[in-house]
Amino acid sequence: MKTMIKRGVMLGVLTLAAIPAFAESSLEEYFYASGKIKVVIAVASIVLAGLVAYVIILDKKVKNLEKKK
């Protein structure tokens, strides 16, 4: 489980580090210009955190089922 958490954190860090490397598009320029890029990053981070939490909870449930058998 610790390795899964480490992988999730590393994936999140690499994802956030890669954001400035993307090519500028008109939509991206709009978000930067209007100051909404922080909202977009916050929402994306919350969704990613929710997915990681879901996978961790699901992993615990599967481990409990495997122990019962």
Image (cartoon, rainbow, N blue to C red):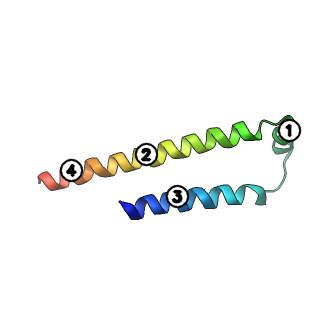
Residue at the bottom extreme of this rendering: 3
Residue 62 spot, x, y in % from top left: 26, 51
- Element on which disc 4 rests: helix
In the picture of the structure, the residue carrying the numbered disc 2 is 53
Spatial CA distance of label 3 from label 2 is 11 Å
Query: In this rendering, would 5 be left or right of 61?
Result: right
Q: Identity of the amino acid at label 1?
A: Tyr
Asked if residue 36 is positioned above or below residue 53 in the image, the reply reads above
- The quarter of the picture where residue 10 lies is bottom right
Q: Where is mark 1, residue-wise?
A: 30
Nearer the camera: disc 2 or disc 1 = 2
**Where on the picture, by quarter, is residue 53?**
top left
Mark 3: which amino acid? Val
**Disc number for residue 64:** 4
Which residue shows up at 35% across the image and 59% down it? Answer: 1
Q: Residues within 10 Å of mark 1 (few under 14, many from 20)?
A: few
- Residue 52 x %, y %: 46, 49
User: Residue at position x 48%, y 45% from top?
Assistant: 51
The first of marks 1 and 3 along the sequence is 3
Q: Looking at numbered disc 2 in the image, what kind of residue is underneath it?
A: Ala
Residue indicated by mark 3: 9
Q: Reading the chain from its start, which is encountered first: label 2 or label 1?
A: 1
Picture residue at 49% right of the left edge, 57% below the top: 8
